[in-house]
Amino acid sequence: MPTSCAIDGCRDAVPREAPVELCERHLNAAAEWSGREFGAPDLLPGPCRLCGSRLGVRYPSGWLCAVCEWVHGELIDTELPPPRVDVVYYLRFGDRVKIGTSANPRQRLAAIWHDDLLGFERGDRRLERRRHEQFSDERFDRTEWFRLTDRLGAHVDTVRRGIDDPWDLYARWLSEAVALRG
C-alpha cells in the first residue's frame, strides 16, 4: 500500500521502489539539488585532452574528467614539455614479477614482454632499490625479476588497493603535475 510523501502538505504517493518517503516530484527536486551540489556522473562530451577518458562528472558550471579531474575544454599548453612523473611498476609474466621504474611507462612497458600490469607506485630509482632490497629473497639473481610469492603478492595488493586500472592512477598523477605547473 503506497504511503504519502514525507514533505509537509504534500499528499502525493511515494513510488514503491523509492529509497526515501518522497513522491516523484520531491525525489526529482532532491536529485537536481544533489547534481548541482555534488555533480552527476555522465559521459564527457568528448575525450579528456589530458588522459583520454570519456568518464566525467557534470556540474552546472561545466565538466570534470572523472579519472584525472581535468576541467573538460580547458586547453593544455602543448608548448611545454610533458611533466615528469616517475613510477615504480609491477609487471607479471607467468609466475614472475618485474619491479622496475620509468618516467615514461607507456613506452617502457611496450618494450617488455608481460601478461599483466599489476600496479604503479609513485617513485623513482630510490624506491625501486628499496623494493628490490625488500623482496631480495624472491629475486632472480642480478635481475629485476622476482618470484610471485604470497609476500610480494600482498605488497602488490596493497599498492593496488582501491585502483581498478593503474593507468587511471598514472593519468591522475600526470594531471596533478600539469596543474601544479600552472
Image (cartoon, rainbow, N blue to C red):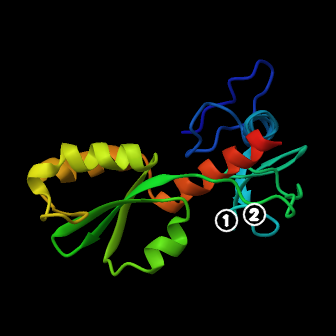
Q: Quadrant of the rendered structure where residue 133 is?
A: top left
Circle number at residue 163: none
Residue toward you, 56 or 97: 97
Side of 15 relative to 122 (left or right): right
- Residue 62 percent coordinates (x, y): 87, 49
Q: Quickly name the residue at label 1.
A: 53
Total numbered badges shown on the rendered structure: 2
Query: Amino acid type of disc 1?
Result: Ser
Side of 107 relative to 65 (left or right): left
- Residue 11 percent coordinates (x, y): 75, 29
Question: What's the CA distance linking mark 1 and mark 2?
Answer: 5 Å
Q: Quickly name the residue at label 2.
A: 48
N-term mark: 1 or 2: 2
Q: Is residue 114 above or below residue 27?
A: below
* Cβ atoms under marks 1 and 2 closer than 8 Å: yes
The residue at the far left in this view is 137
Q: Is residue 61 above or below residue 9?
A: below
Q: Quadrant of the rendered structure where residue 19 is?
A: top right
